Amino acid sequence: MAKEDGIIIAGGGPVGLIVGLILGRAGVEVTLFDKGDILHQQPRAATIHPASLDILDDLGVYERIEPLGLVCPIVNYYDQQELLASFDHAVLAGETRHPWVLQCEQDKLSRVLFAMASGLPTLKIETETEVLDCSQSADAVEVEVKHADGSRDRLKGRYLIGADGARSTVRSKADIAFEGFTYGERFMIIGTPYDFSQAGYAYRNYISDPVEWYNLFKISWQGPPGVYRLVVPVSLDEALAEDRILETCQRKFQRFHPRSEPYDIVLYDSYVVHQRVAATFRKGRIILTGDAAHLNSPIGAMGMNSGIHDAVNLAANLLRVLRGAENEGALDRYVRQRRHVAVEHVQAATIANKKNMEQRDRATRREYRKEMQRAANDPVLAKKFLLRTSLIECLRDAEKIA
Ligand SMILES: Cc1cc2nc3c(=O)[nH]c(=O)nc-3n(C[C@H](O)[C@H](O)[C@H](O)COP(=O)(O)OP(=O)(O)OC[C@H]3O[C@@H](n4cnc5c(N)ncnc54)[C@H](O)[C@@H]3O)c2cc1C
């Protein structure tokens, strides 16, 4: 168990593991709890943007995940079948050490982080242990946990970090509102080994369509040759009709790219999608980060990426407080910087991305088409576009906030 002045982390997803890794490497006593086993997380996120690759490189993580993923310099935007714009991240050379996107699923990233974090003497990771409750006084936090065998423990620490994802227990026990909205439809992810490069698709494609939009991405999955994942909206009724789910998947793929043969469907899942930000990321000694603090639609691939940015910002500021280099104002700076990014960049961009994907108004679609074509055909605008979508701009913007 943690020393009474140690740090407690709830949640060993990519975000909690990064905070734990940085603090553990700095010699801070940390106890991290995850209610699962960390080794078998869901492969939700796959796109890791350049800004995050630089961070993961600084942590020594990049070299371990690159062989597990696909290096993707190109991203394409379509309006239905028509290629509107193609961007090459190579224009970001000089702005990042990684002018490409790495398609690497988040369960692979978590396993790598878990392996790296597990060897640290001051970081204790307790899997299959759920944080049930938390409270705080002026100088300590206390959590109640339940182990896999049903036994319970209480322990104290100096700060509690809630990195326990979308349904954060820490957020709800700390009574922090989760402001925003939830979309009426679900997003479905369907995977097939069919090789869409035959049809001219790159590894990353956004396809706007007023009837049914799509995102098509390649992931390495269980190794070469990998699979293409189609993200597509699905009604609640369709998503819940489990007996017809494969039929639904087939219909979605056939509408997207009709073929005489059925698609081989190797994976499918569907998700409720929220656009929400916690009213505050800090209440005294309890601090939220990653999905526990903010949720957004996956169009634009910003959730885990911005969570990684939260994690390094929080760890750096917390270290300054623990070392006495700064007072707790450093934690408020974390909140100001990262909440600003969550609201002004991530929420704004992902809400706009969905609107662009599904736009039905002809005049607005025409405007979007023109804007994308202009950006792709002008190197200055193309770079500006990619600085924004690859989350470099929002990191720089956050640094300006004192
Ligand atoms: C379909 C889909 C595709 C996506 N694609 C992308 C993408 O390409 N790029 C991107 O940046 N983002 C993407 N995202 C978002 C991304 O998945 C999340 O932002 C990311 O998982 C956040 O990481 P996290 O560590 O904060 O939370 P999580 O990954 O949810 O981890 C939380 C951890 O906390 C544990 N936990 C939960 N409750 C407790 C408790 N009470 N006690 C102890 N442990 C607990 C869980 O077991 C889990 O391990 C996608 C999301 C979806 C749904």
Image (cartoon, rainbow, N blue to C red):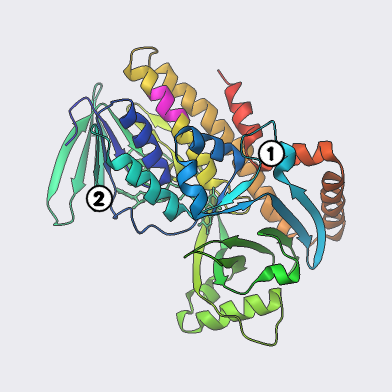
Mark 1 is surrounded, within 10 Å at the Cα level, by few (under 14), some (14 to 19) or many (20 or more) other residues, namely some
The residue under label 2 is which amino acid type?
A: Thr
Query: Which residue is at 62% across, 74% downward?
Result: 194
The residue singled out by tag 2 in the image is: 127
Q: Is residue 316 magenta?
A: yes
Q: Looking at the picture, does residue 200 appear above or below residue 249?
A: above
Q: Which residue occupies the foreground of this view, 271 or 384?
A: 384
Cβ of mark 2 under 8 A from ligand 1: no
Q: Secondary structure at mark 1?
A: helix
Q: Which residue occupies the foreground of this view, 320 or 51?
A: 51
Mark 2 touching mark 1, by CB under 8 A?
Answer: no
Residue range of the region highlighted in magenta in the rendering? 313-318
Q: Say left or right for 209 vs 392.
A: right
Place of residue 225 in the rendered image (x, y in percent of width and height, measured from the top left): 56, 67
Q: Which mark is residue 388?
A: 1
Query: Which residue is at 37% across, 51% downward?
Result: 111
Q: Is residue 9 visible?
A: yes
Query: Which residue is at 75% across, 39% downward?
Result: 91
Place of residue 26 in the rendered image (x, y in percent of width and height, measured from the top left): 33, 25
Q: Which residue occupies the foreground of this view, 397 or 112?
A: 112
Q: Is residue 232 magenta?
A: no
Place of residue 202 in the rendered image (x, y in percent of width and height, measured from the top left): 70, 60
Q: Say left or right for 262 vs 310.
A: right
Among numbered discs 2 and 1, the one appearing first in the sequence? 2
Q: Secondary structure at mark 2?
A: loop
Q: Quadrant of the N terminus?
A: top left
